[in-house]
Amino acid sequence: MIRDPFLPMQGIHNFRDYGGYETSDGRRVRTGLLYRSGQHVEAEDADLAAIDALGIRTVIDLRGESERIRNPCRRSDEFDAEVIFHPGETTSSPPHEDVGSTAVTADYARQRMTAVYTRMPENPAMISMFSRFFQALDQNEGASLVHCFAGKDRTGIAASMVLHVLEVPHESIEREFLLTNDAPTLEVLKRQSLPGIEARIGKLDEDAVRSLLEVRREYLHTYLDRVTASHGSFDAYLTQAIGVDDAMRARLKARFVE
């Protein structure tokens, strides 16, 4: 994919269009309809104006209640999209927000992140939110935006699910997932995440920071291995747990693939 998927933002991390990928039958996922990002608590006025210009009609906020209370998203006066969220918690404290009171090394950070991806497939709140996400894509007009705190783990899995349903090859899905590491706004996430962590456990080295705030191929593989072990395949998980049946798949492909 030649185009730059990242939209210029000053106070939002990892805002990008995850369309544009070629599907297994040689077609292409439409751009301008599927967006992903981190939270918008530090969004600047120019960021909000740029979002308003995208025609986003649905926002899927994968954060839990405590995350939303601590980090309320900024919205412009013109914002009128539907915001879908879970009324309770969607996860235990994300590792990039609170890693505990033990010294954090890069290896420990990767273990914590792997644990997140191990638990996510069986988390009832996340299953519910992913299901509501697909229902919104199926039923709502206009563009959508899916985000969580950092826009990389819960959001990364959500985007991977969509691209899989649209029949984008795994290699491209993996490439899209790893694009998080190229986001030009890592300093935004560091500013939002690291002070709380380092106040508890001290200064982190750069390798530990990157293991917490970026993504790794092994994280995605951990998730996929888990759903395959429990349901036989990613497709079976999407059908049985998330509710993406053949009819919905056909409608989504008709809408999002050109």
Image: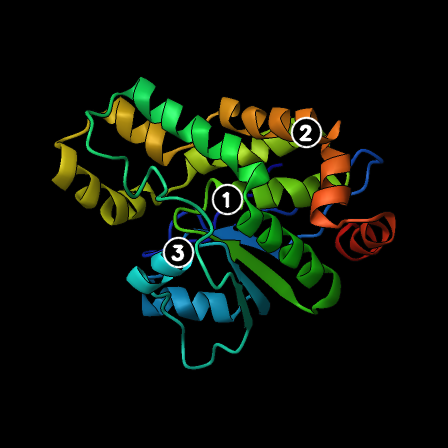
Of residues 180 and 93, the one nearer the viewer is 93
Count residues near mark 3 (Cα–Cα under 10 Å), then give few for <14, some for 14-19, many for 20+. Answer: many
Secondary structure under tag 3 reads loop
Q: Residue at horizontal 43%, vertical 35%?
A: 182
- Residue 200 image position (x, y, % from top left): 14, 38
- Residue 107 image position (x, y, % from top left): 33, 18
**CB atoms of marks 2 and 3 within 8 Å:** no
Q: Amino acid at mark 2?
A: Ser
Q: Residue at horizontal 31%, vertical 45%?
A: 189
Residue that carries the numbered disc 1 in the rendered image = 154
Secondary structure under tag 1 reads helix
Count residues near mark 2 (Cα–Cα under 10 Å), then give few for <14, some for 14-19, many for 20+. Answer: few
Which label was assigned to residue 39? 3
Does 147 appear above or below 120?
below
Q: What whole-number distance in Å separates the C-alpha atoms at marks 2 and 1?
A: 19 Å
The answer to whether residue 89 is left or right of residue 254 is left
Closer to us: mark 2 or mark 3? 2
Does 221 appear above or below 241?
above
Reading the chain from its start, which is encountered first: label 3 or label 1?
3
Closer to us: mark 3 or mark 1? 1
Closer to us: mark 2 or mark 1? 2
Q: What whole-number distance in Å separates the C-alpha atoms at marks 3 and 1?
A: 12 Å
Reading the chain from its start, which is encountered first: label 2 or label 3?
3
Q: Amino acid at mark 1?
A: Arg
Q: Amino acid at mark 3?
A: Gln
Reading the chain from its start, which is encountered first: label 2 or label 1?
1
The answer to whether residue 125 is left or right of residue 190 is right
The answer to whether residue 169 is left or right of residue 209 is right
Q: Residue 226 occupies which quadrant of the picture?
A: top right
Residue that carries the numbered disc 2 in the rendered image = 230
